[in-house]
Amino acid sequence: MSETGIGAAVRRKEDFRFLTGQGTYTDDINRPGQLHAVILRSPHAHAAIRGIDTAAAAAAAGVVAVFTAKDMAADGVGGLPCGWQIHSKDGSPMIEPPHPALATDRVRHVGDPVAVVIAETKAQAREAAELIAVDYQPLPAVASAAEAQKPGAPQLFDAAPGNLCFDWHLGDKAQADAAFARAAHVAKLDIVNNRLIPNAMEPRAAIGEYDKATGEYTLYTTSQNPHVIRLLMGAFVLHIPEHKLRVVAPDVGGGFGSKIYHYAEEAIVTWAAGKVRRPVKWTADRSESFMSDAHGRDHATHAELALDKDGKFLGLKVSTIANMGGYLSTFAPAIPTYLYATLLAGTYTTPVIYCEVKAIFTNTVPVDAYRGAGRPEATYILERLVDTAAREMRIDPAELRRRNFIPKDAYPYQTPVALQYDSGDYFTTLDKALAAADYAGFARRRDEAARRGKLRGIGLATYIEACGIAPSAVAGSLGARAGLYEAAEIRVHPTGSVTVFTGSHSHGQGHETTFAQLVADRLGIPIENVEVSHGDTDKIPFGMGTYGSRSLAVGGSAIVKALDKVVAKGRKIAAHLLEAAEADIQFKDGKYVVEGTDRAKSFGEVALTAYVPHNYPIEELEPGLDESAFYDPKNFTFPSGAHVAEVEIDRDTGIVELVNFTACDDFGRIINPLIVEGQVHGGLVQGIGQALLENCVYDPEGQLLTGSYMDYCMPRASDVPSFAVSTNTTLCTHNPLGVKGCGEAGAIGAPAAVMNAVLDALSPLGIRHLDMPASPERVWRAIQQHSLAQAAE
Amino acid sequence: MYDFSYHKPSSLAEAAKALGSAEDGKLMAGGMTLIPTLKQRLARPSDVIDLGGIVELKGIRRAGNALVIGAMARHAEVAHSDVVRSAIPALAELAEGIGDPQVRNRGTIGGSIANADPAADYPAAVVGLGATVETNKRKIAADDFFKGLFETALEDGEIVTAVSFPIPEKAAYMKFPNPASRYAIVGAFVAKTGGGVRVAVTGAGPSVFRVAAMEQALAKSFTPDAIKDIKVAADGLNADIHASAEYRAHLVTVMARRAVAAAAG
Amino acid sequence: MPSSVRMTVNGKAVSGTVEPRTLLVQFLREHLGLTGTHVGCDTSQCGACVVHVDGVSVKSCTMLAVQAEGAKVTTIEGLANGGLHPMQAAFHEHHGLQCGFCTPGMIMSAIDLVKHNSDPSEQEIREWLEGNICRCTGYHNIVKSIKAGAAAMRGATK
């Protein structure tokens, strides 16, 4: 292994600009003549708009324009599109209500945009926004999906009776019922997956710009996938042809899914820039982010696991109500369906699985993919059920899992829920995690804690993840309205340095380093000679962006494909220069060598020849060394892992302290272990946050009670320990690098591991389930109730 | 933020004058509450009078059997002050636990108590130690100072200049922080002096309050066990998504007990 | 009413005309173009805006520019002259940053910690970071970086 090649812990190339304050985030950009937009948002969860009087605002100091939905409609501006269509059990398509950028006659959640003020300064725009008089007629509202589906609940859309978006299922119910009829034991849980607010540290921002000379629009935006935004906004919302629309996602301060979607503000500033003929900038306050960034999770589920007398899983039945919020966000329908139910086999051989999902509209912010997206929800249910079954059947939780793991020699393994796993080794991964966590020595630690008056528990979770979503044809058949390939271009410069243009956007993942390692490794050139460019639709080929842990498995594969083309063309040039047959030329360590001789040409010499083609096979070959490739994955990749959490609970206060966390993951081949570990750490804290701290709370009337960091509990450094992370590698069999993806793993495994540990600690009191987050009061109440119940016995 | 006029007086007299002549003037000490309030456009003062330039409000000193802390003493100064650490270590520890390091570098004791946030830490110490609040007009006993939710005995034009803390035999503060804001859900300050025992609780109610039953029990026996069965009523206590009134009532006993253990230990 | 303000930022005397309501972070970002200092929340909690004023770390989103009249302000841009401060270098070496948004505030806060405590323990570092929120790293590598940065700063001052 070279110091900078595949497998090396290369320090990140992108760090310097971030460490020195030289990063360029969207809000750091200021365009000449720039105006500022402030968006007036609904204070009501649900209300009819009877009128909007903007006269006073329009007359206020510094105000250039005030726009409402009427103005956008007059220009033919369309609604925000949804990128995935689900069909209900009965074959009918999901209900897809209009999602206007600015509310027309009704607002459906607190924060729904109603009008935009554009002024010389942000302060002026804000002051003017307060002068807009909106005549709201408040309507009854509903925030909980379980409540919203009940008869008599407030209705959001005439087209969606019962607030039902779709009623979908996967699997064979009759077979599942038959499996349950044979069961020796059935474990059952009612389980809530709490709503989360993603909270990337950089608030969303957008700058729209219109070039009067060329008629071109430019949008700078905090996006994970600029080409997707260009396609959706250009084709469906603003009807700007793509050659007249450039979307730039510069440095982006974290995404975690929340910056995948096409948001109203992007369309508003771009369209408004055209109207006022000056650049228009909008930057969210954090309080706006809370009520306008797509939220995550929010499922209520009843699940049952059937086991035979030896603990073999016979069948799984899952019934979920998924909260979609007030509108459909870009990829929302895919999350509680194809990214959820398909994961319910987990690491196990469960032969029959049936899952039904009702997606419900409520008066809340739209819900979409958030780190893990469907897979944490599936893992949480499965792993809580397995632990519950283990406890009820008095089988060690690790042992019960081993009895049901997919055998090492069973790959490719077809699950009953559509996926075919290509590789994995769950036994070794679990063993490594348990050894690292000293699972065997836990009883001693529990006894020691008990002497200090603490309840100590250990919990584990295994998971399977489906990453690098695709192939496009399969996704299309399941309702995707886009392809799911990735694109790359390798531009070799005349002196042999290389620029990589990739559709995979980097907003913390370190692509500028990892992708450069791929190039340095393949072409044998110093990593300093590789630059990675991403995020600008005027520069990069049409790419699908970054989500679902796909960057390396899909984007990296596209880079490898393009590199193969570069190497192949270089071989032809080298053959010409060396006067040898192409078949006799080997490319190794940055040199084209005539096999069995010491005659060679360096990659740099070949590159120079390609651009200064004086001695060149010009009849057969074009000059230049610039290749591009699209890669459409053959299958998902299937990272997996085993996580072990250990907690201590203070009986007096209910405070849960996470004392140890151990993870062993299988991510396939690892290009940069330093970056991979960092991804795991970050994911873990988001998962731990969900289990112990984070909770988006609406009151029954749809007012957001956790609208700032004063109430929404972000994990801090003192809330978590350092982690013990390791890997156990099996290679992905169907992509050129053998990579699987690592971005979401932590957030998938951790919630179940932590909650299993909490419930293990509480099990001596007879507590069998608690919902997340295991907040102090929730834990204290459970202890109180069960202590009283035990005392009464 | 709405616009306002800004004044930075260099003496208390000038500050009082600026406040008196302002239509709707607001004093700013550290600004740790005022500035966020202004940013959220929840207040619209005509004038902001910055007390940061007034030397007479600064300083921490020992005066006989009392510790006198200037109103503009930053939390970090109190936390790191050798004078405080030797006189009332519990007070230094309380200051060390307020907000975060950057808030402690700006926030002041005077600003904290004048604001009288129900979840602030300092009011527990002021009442728990039976301190005296000194203003430009008079001296106010701690028990008379905090009147209710964000409400104090301060009159228009009155400026806190210092807080004088009698030095106790033993004292400790225990806080159960809100997991999100890190303000006190319940904070209990317990102090034993020659005159008896005081137990002051912040975070739990609309304003800091004393728990007489605990004080009496602790006067007899200054041990955690002496108060383990003394409960405050949940009625009238604060309730929010993080802690119900009932839970807060329970935590009052737990935190007070732990404060006694820490003070006695 | 706009008034003039003067201070020293990263060793250079600067001045500007600001409204009293102008925050220090706005002055730095909008008037001086020092966009390394970020704004991540509006409740003074996230710490992306931490800078040093007269040698101590403060949240520049919770301080008026006029309050910094005459003060010495250091931002992330002023920590090192061209190269990296030992704390910046430690964040690079130990992968203490991902998206980079919280990083300037983290580093400014960490340096202030080391001024108070030249050899902080893991627990002391975690507690000190109360006012700095990171969503990417899970804090693991930030803690590691600060430990290493503190050691490097100790070495540098010996």
Image: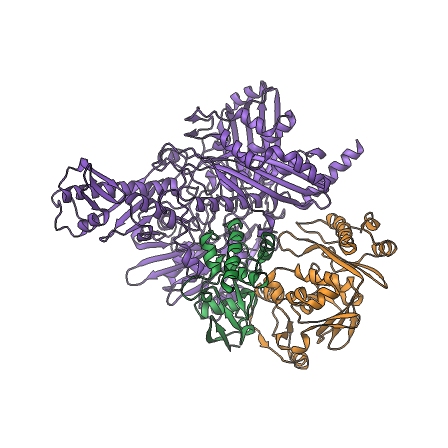
Chain colours: A purple, B orange, C green
Quadrant of the drawing holding the C terminus of chain A: top right
C24 above or below A296?
below
> In the rendered image, which quarter is residue A191 located in?
top right
Q: Position of residue C144 (x, y in %)?
A: 52, 51
Quadrant of the drawing holding the N terminus of chain A: top left
Q: Position of residue B40 (x, y in %)?
A: 58, 63
Left or right of residue B29, residue A730 in this image: left
**In front here: A444 or A422?**
A444
Question: Furthest residue to the right?
Answer: B220
> In the rendered image, which quarter is residue B14 located in?
bottom right
Q: Position of residue A91 (x, y in %)?
A: 45, 30
**In front here: A426 or A653?**
A426
**In front here: B237 or C110?**
C110
> In the rendered image, which quarter is residue B202 located in?
bottom right
A335 above or below A425?
below
Residue A373 appears in view? no
**In front here: A411 or B92?**
B92
Question: Furthest residue to the top?
Answer: A182
Left or right of residue B243, residue A110 in this image: left
Q: Position of residue A516 (x, y in %)?
A: 34, 48
Left or right of residue A255, residue A688 in this image: right
Residue A136 appears in view? yes
